[in-house]
Image: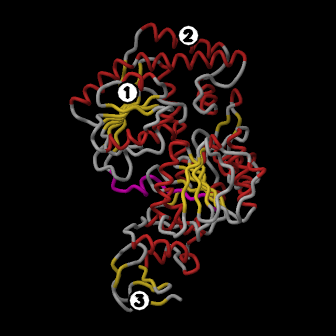
């Protein structure tokens, strides 16, 4: 029952001071008018409120948007949560879960340890809770029991045909954009696990800072992985209709401005927070392109690759699109003449990266002399091989086994810098001590490039961050960067169009 408060106090949700008569009492708890306006009705707040109270006893509190978003998720059967890196997606999803059901977290291999830590932090107060990191050696040979949480990486997902989930099993897919390709074996197994859990009375939550990595169509496939694509839009064809998409030259889809109906539909199943709303008050982030002159031999390799591209009647946009669909494969999965052309472009890009290494080394030396903690990223291993050997540097690549050790040492000030590939070091790691980020080159996926620089520009950053992109004097380098920036703007426009603003609750929670 809702009652005016008769005493002054502190809001149990946001900790705001409440004068007499200025708040409300709900379930014997005092909340301020602002929290009440976000839709915190008794029937909605029960489960999340109980968790918040238990967490407060441990000295843990949620940010206002985490509290509001957890309540929205608790009401959804399936949902997609899109919050920028560092915004607390794991916390929000764990707090939203009622009771102590079986939980399966599907995530990148490098993030399993993070999830165990987060689970212990946000749900560890529950008696009888147990947390397991499922490895390839152990195998996912049974569904978790009530009170258990399994963290399992995408690569070792089993076929669920011979297993039956416990009723009410919750599946959380971290970096859910990884299961966007319906032809991929991993995607098929993840979708089967999700479908089986939901059929058994459970739920499925997808988490991503970037649910669209390259093209709007990816959002449909991500939603479909959660059982939400067709139920929300009917078909991919209608999704494209709402996006005013059309097939352009060479079969490349081109997208217009989404119609209002697109956002009306997507907001029912996806909750989006803008980075600037979630991370207010962060120091400035400055991006600068540094011109670099490469040798004639490299320029010739690039010229020949561009000539082959034109000869085949293809555009660089075709290549960028194909390469991004191949999930950063150097040799794009295609055939015949197109494969040869694409391989030449990929080889030219690798040559450019190698030619820029002397400039990278010089820049790193200058930053070392100025005692500036630095991150170096590249789509190729060349930078990691060279910079990683410097004294006082840590390296994170696909095969790194001491990822956490490198992160801890850098944050503690024991390392001058960290170098890594964009794919390996751009996720599930916090490097907020860095003042400078240097990109030797960019990967084909604009969202991954952004995720990399947000390793250091996130909650906890207390200083300005400077991003420097080494850009050669060949048109290939410049045009690729231009195309990637254009795709990034489209993604940003689409996602932010569905975003909630500062202090805004989801429409489904509104009074």
- Which mark is first along the chain, 1 or 2? 2
Q: Could you tell which of marks 1 and 3 lies nearer the N-terminus?
A: 3
**Residue 273 among magenta residues:** yes
Residue at image location 32% in from the left, 36% down from the top:
436
Label 1 Cα crowd, 10 Å radius (few <14 / some 14-19 / many 20+): some
Real-space Cα distance between discs 2 and 1? 32 Å
**Residue at which label 3 appears:** 5
**Element class at badge 1:** loop
493 vs 469, left or right, is: right
Residues in magenta, as a range: 267-282
Q: Are marks 1 and 3 in contact (CB under 8 Å)?
A: no
185 relative position to 92: left or right:
right
Q: Is residue 507 above or below residue 284?
A: below
Q: Quadrant of residue 292?
A: top left
- The x, y position of residue 163, in whole percent, is 75, 54
Badge 2 or badge 3: first in the primary sequence: 3
SS for dot 3? loop
In front: label 2 or label 1:
1
Q: Which residue is mark 1?
A: 388
Identify the mark at residue 304; answer none if there is no mark.
2
Frontmost of labels 2 and 3 is: 3
Q: Quadrant of the C terminus?
A: bottom right
Q: Secondary structure at mark 2?
A: helix
Q: CA distance from mark 1 to mark 3?
A: 60 Å
Q: Nearer the viewer, residue 240 or 215?
A: 215
Residue drawn at (38%, 85%), measured in percent from left and top? 22
- CA distance separating discs 2 and 3: 76 Å
């Amino acid at each position: 029952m809702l009652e005016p408060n008769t005493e002054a106090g502190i809001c149990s949700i946001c900790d705001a001071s409440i004068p007499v008569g200025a708040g409300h009492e709900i379930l014997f708890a005092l909340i301020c008018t602002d929290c009440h306006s976000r839709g915190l009705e008794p029937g909605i707040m029960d489960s999340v409120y109980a968790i918040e109270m238990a967490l407060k006893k441990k000295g843990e509190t949620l940010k206002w948007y985490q509290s509001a978003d957890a309540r929205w998720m608790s009401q959804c059967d399936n949902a997609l949560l899109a919050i920028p890196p560092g915004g607390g997606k794991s916390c929000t999803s764990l707090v939203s879960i009622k009771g102590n059901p079986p939980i399966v977290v599907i995530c990148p291999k490098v993030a399993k340890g993070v999830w165990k830590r987060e689970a212990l932090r946000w749900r560890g107060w529950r008696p009888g809770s147990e947390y397991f990191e499922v490895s390839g050696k152990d195998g996912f040979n049974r569904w978790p029991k009530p009170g258990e949480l399994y963290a399992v990486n995408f690569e070792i997902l089993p076929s669920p045909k011979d297993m039956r989930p416990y009723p009410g099993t919750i599946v959380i897919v971290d970096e859910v954009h990884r299961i966007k390709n319906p032809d991929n074996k991993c995607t098929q197994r993840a979708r089967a696990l999700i479908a089986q859990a939901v059929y058994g009375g459970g739920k499925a939550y997808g988490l991503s800072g970037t649910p669209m990595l390259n093209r709007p169509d990816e959002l449909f496939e991500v939603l479909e992985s959660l059982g939400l694509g067709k139920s929300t839009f009917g078909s991919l064809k209608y999704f494209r209709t709402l996006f005013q998409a059309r097939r352009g030259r060479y079969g490349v889809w081109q997208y217009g401005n989404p119609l209002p109906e697109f956002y009306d539909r997507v907001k029912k199943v996806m909750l989006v927070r803008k980075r600037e709303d979630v991370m207010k008050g962060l120091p400035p982030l400055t991006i600068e392109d540094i011109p670099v002159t490469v040798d004639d031999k490299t320029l010739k390799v690039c010229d020949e690759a561009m000539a082959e591209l034109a000869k085949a009647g293809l555009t660089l946009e075709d290549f960028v699109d194909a390469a991004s669909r191949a999930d950063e494969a150097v040799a794009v999965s295609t055939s015949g003449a197109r494969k040869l052309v694409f391989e030449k472009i990929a080889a030219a890009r690798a040559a450019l990266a190698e030619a820029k290494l002397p400039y990278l080394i010089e820049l790193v030396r200058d930053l070392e002399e100025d005692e500036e903690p630095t991150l170096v990223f590249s789509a190729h291993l060349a930078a990691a091989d060279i910079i990683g050997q410097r004294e006082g540097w840590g390296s994170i690549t696909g095969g790194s086994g001491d990822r956490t050790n490198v992160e801890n040492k850098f944050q503690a000030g024991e390392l001058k810098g960290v170098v890594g590939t964009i794919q390996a070091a751009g996720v599930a790691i916090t490097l907020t001590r860095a003042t400078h980020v240097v990109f030797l080159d960019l990967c084909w996926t604009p969202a991954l490039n952004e995720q990399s620089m947000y390793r250091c520009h996130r909650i906890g950053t207390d200083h300005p961050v400077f991003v420097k992109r080494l850009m050669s004097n060949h048109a290939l380098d410049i045009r690729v960067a231009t195309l990637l920036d254009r795709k990034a703007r489209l993604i940003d426009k689409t996602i932010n169009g569905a975003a909630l603003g500062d202090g805004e609750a989801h429409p489904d929670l509104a009074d």
